[in-house]
Amino acid sequence: MKLKKQFSDFYKEIKIDEEVEDLREKREILQNDIETKLPGELKKHGIELKKSEIEMFDQGSYKLHTTISNDYGSIDRDVAVMFPLDIKENSDPRKIKAYVRDALKHEGRTLDIKEPCVNVSYVENGEEWMHIDLPVYAKYDGKVYLARGSEFATEGNYSWEEADPQGLNDWLLKKITGNDQLRRSIRYIKKWKQEKYHNSSLDHEIPPSIGLTMLMCEHFTEVTGTEGDDDLTSLRMSIENIINEFILTYDNNGEIIKADITF
């Protein structure tokens, strides 16, 4: 394979290693705070919840071992917070996310209600060095719903969205586990995203990492040669597979104005 050593060196540079212990420690502290404080916070608003009913589980890159170093910001981890909730009686997901935020208030944390999650960031010397995203899920009537909407989202821009976070975890793990070349390819494309969009200030311009991960899993092509895995050829072919799945819409001047893709 051409550039085999360069790919190997590059991969060692972008994969998370020594910072993992910090992510593990903060996650354990947050879980303890949620389990001990969230039931009381919800009770203030007439919602009964037992500590034993709260489920927390990793999702995203940390769960999949595809986390990368960040040259332009902080390292991160996604931890789902799920509990039984009547979403008919509690139809505004922004309020529920606010209750989760209030249960986590602490001098050493900065808390923000973002569209898909409650964001917990840790700042040192004036700069964020790590954050943990907490998507909030409600279990209701045999289904699971994600609380969508930022703190000040207007009518029509917040909702309870049906989801299957554990099913998605299982699907991705089945694809990735034991496939080192696929895991490397996912990290490569996530690094591309980081370099391409680190200056973007608009969330809708930035492709979500979970979306890129799913695309790579679905369209990955394994390539090996006489020297072992050929990551360069594999990555090129996999990206071509992804590009070919897009349905493009052009304006009258031949410029692309829309690019749709489905799974």
Image (tube, helix red, strand yellow):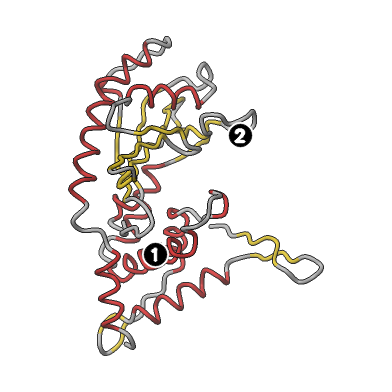
Query: Does 236 sit above or below residue 19?
Result: below
20 or 261: which is nearer to us?
Answer: 20
Residue pointed to by mark 1: 191
The residue shown at (38%, 32%) is 111
Residue pointed to by mark 2: 157
On the image, the x and y values in percent for residue 216 come to: 43, 64
- Within 10 Å of disc 2 (Cα), the crowding (few <14, some 14-19, many 20+) is few
- Give the quadrant of residue 252: bottom right
The residue shown at (31%, 77%) is 7
On the image, the x and y values in percent for residue 262 come to: 57, 57
72 or 16: which is nearer to us?
Answer: 72
The residue shown at (32%, 57%) is 174
243 or 131: which is nearer to us?
Answer: 131
On the image, the x and y values in percent for residue 148 come to: 51, 35
The residue shown at (50%, 38%) is 115
Element at label 2: loop
On the image, the x and y values in percent for residue 98 come to: 44, 24
Query: Does 232 sit above or below residue 174?
Result: below
In the picture, the quarter occupied by the N terminus is bottom left
